[in-house]
Amino acid sequence: MSAVPKLALALKQLGYADLQQCMHCGMCLPTCPTYTATLNERQSPRGRIALMRAVADERIEATPAFAEEMYNCLGCLACQTACPAGVGYGSLLETARAEVEEKGLLATPRRSLVRWFLIRLVFTRPRLLRLVGRSIRLWTASGGKKLFRALGLPRLLPKYLRDLEAQTPEGRAQFSDALIAAVEKPEGIPRHRVGLLTGCVQDLLYSEINRDTAEVLLANGCEVHTPRLQPCCGSLHAHNGDIEAAKGLAKRLIDLFPLEGENALDAVLSNAGGCGSHLKEYGHLLSDDPAYAAKAALWSKKFKDIHAWLAETGIRPPKMETEGPPCRVTYHDSCHLCHGQKIAKEPRALLKGIPGLELVDLPEASWCCGSAGVYNITRPEMAASLRDRKIGHIAETGATVVALANPGCHIQVENGARLRGLHVEVAHPLSLLARAYRRERGDAKL
C-alpha cells in the first residue's frame, strides 16, 4: 500500500474527472509563466496534472519535490482560459496543496510558524489584522521606515526578510469603516440595494478604493450596505491549502449580508479580482455543509464583480468638460479577474466611457505580474522577473496611469515602477470613474 493513500483518495474524490480530462495537447504551455521561463515540462500545467494523476493512481508517492512543484505554480489560471477541454486546473491545484499541507510535506519550524501567524491567526481576525495595518502605517508615518533604510539596516536582515521589507506598503490612515457608513443612500429612489465587500488587504492598504467604489454605486442609483469589520474572504487560505479555514471565513462573511427576506440585497459586490474569483465559488466550497449549502448557493447567485454589475445595470456617463490632451491610461488584467471570472471587456468599457481618458493597449495585458497572492514573498526571483516584464510593457505604452483591479497587483506594480524609476500612477478603474463624478460635482477633493 502506498504511503500516501489519503492524497490519492482526495484527488480522486475532488477532481479525478478533471485529471482524466486533460488531453496533454499542450495548448496551455505558451500561456504558463513558469513553463515559458524554464521550459521544464513538470513546471507546466499538464506536467503538474500528470504528477497529480500519478499520485492519485498511486504510481508515485507524494514527496517534498511534488509539494514544491505544486507551490511553484502561480495559480494564475491562464491555462484554464487556453484549455480546449475545460480542465478545472484551479480546483485541482487547491486540492493538491490542501493535502500537501495536511501531510506536512514542506513543514519546517519557520514555515509552520509563519503559516500559523499569518494564515491561521492574523488573516482570520479582522481586529488583529487592522492592528498590523496600523503598525505598518505608524512605521511609515513616523519616519521609521525611511530612517531604517537610510542607515542601511535592511542589509543586516536575513534575505527573506530583506526581500519582504523592500515590498512593505505604506498603509492608510483610515480603514473602510471610517470612510463608508453602514448604509448610504443615493439621491432619489434607489434603483438597487447592494452589499459592498471591503476585503482585507484592500481595506488595510487601499481603503480609498472602497470609498471610491461606494461613490460610484451611489452615483448610479444604488443603496450601499457595507457591514462593519468584515473578515477575509478566505481566498488566501484556499489557495494555500487551508480549506477548513476558508470554509469558516466564508460562513462568517455570508452571515453579514442579508440575502433573503424583505431586506434582501440585490447583489453583493467586490472590487478585487483575486477575492472575487474565490467569493463566487462559495456555493461549491460549502456544498456539503447542511447548515450553509443553500445560503452559499444563493450567495454565488448574488455575488458579482463590480465591473460586471455596472455593465449589466448600466453606468451613468459622467457629465464633465475636459481641457487639454487626454490622460493616457493603460489597463492590466488581474489574473483571477480575467482568467478566473472571465471579466476583461467590462473594465475596459468603463475606462473608455470616462471623459478625458485615452485607453491604450498594454502588451501581454493578461500575463501575470508575479504577485499571485503571496507568491512574490515565497518565490521572489520568479515574481521579480514577471514584475519587471510587466513594468517594461507598461513603460512601452507611454501611459501616465495604469489601471488595475486587484490589491496584490497594485502592490506589485507600484513596487516595480518605483524600482525602475517609472513615474506612473497605479489606480483602480472605479477610482478613475469616481474622480470623474467628483469633477462633475465640482468637488475639490479629487
Image: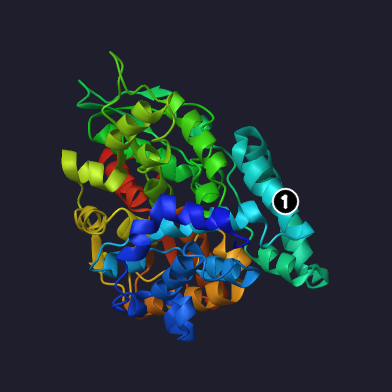
Looking at the rendered structure, the kind of residue marked 1 is: Trp
**Residue labelled with disc 1:** 139
* Residue 255 drawn at (x, y percent): 45, 24
- Determine whether 92 is above or below 41 in the image: above
Query: Which quarter of the rendered picture does the N terminus lie within?
Result: bottom right
Q: Quadrant of residue 5?
A: bottom right
Q: Is residue 123 above or below residue 191?
A: below
Q: Position of residue 426 (x, y in %)?
A: 43, 61
Q: Residue at x 67, y 52 (%)?
A: 115
Q: Is residue 196 visible?
A: yes
Q: Position of residue 142 (x, y in %)?
A: 73, 50
| The residue positioned farthest toward the front in the image shown | 1
In depth, the one of 320 and 243 nearer the eye is: 243
Q: Position of residue 417 (x, y in %)?
A: 50, 71
Q: Nearer the viewer, residue 57 or 88?
A: 57
Specify whether residue 274 is in view. Answer: no
Q: Is residue 154 left or right of residue 325?
A: right
What colour-coding does the image apply? rainbow
CA neighbours of label 1 inside 10 A, class few (<14), some (14 to 19), many (20+): some
Q: Nearer the viewer, residue 263 or 432?
A: 263
Q: Residue furthest bottom?
A: 39
User: How many numbered tags mark residues here?
Assistant: 1
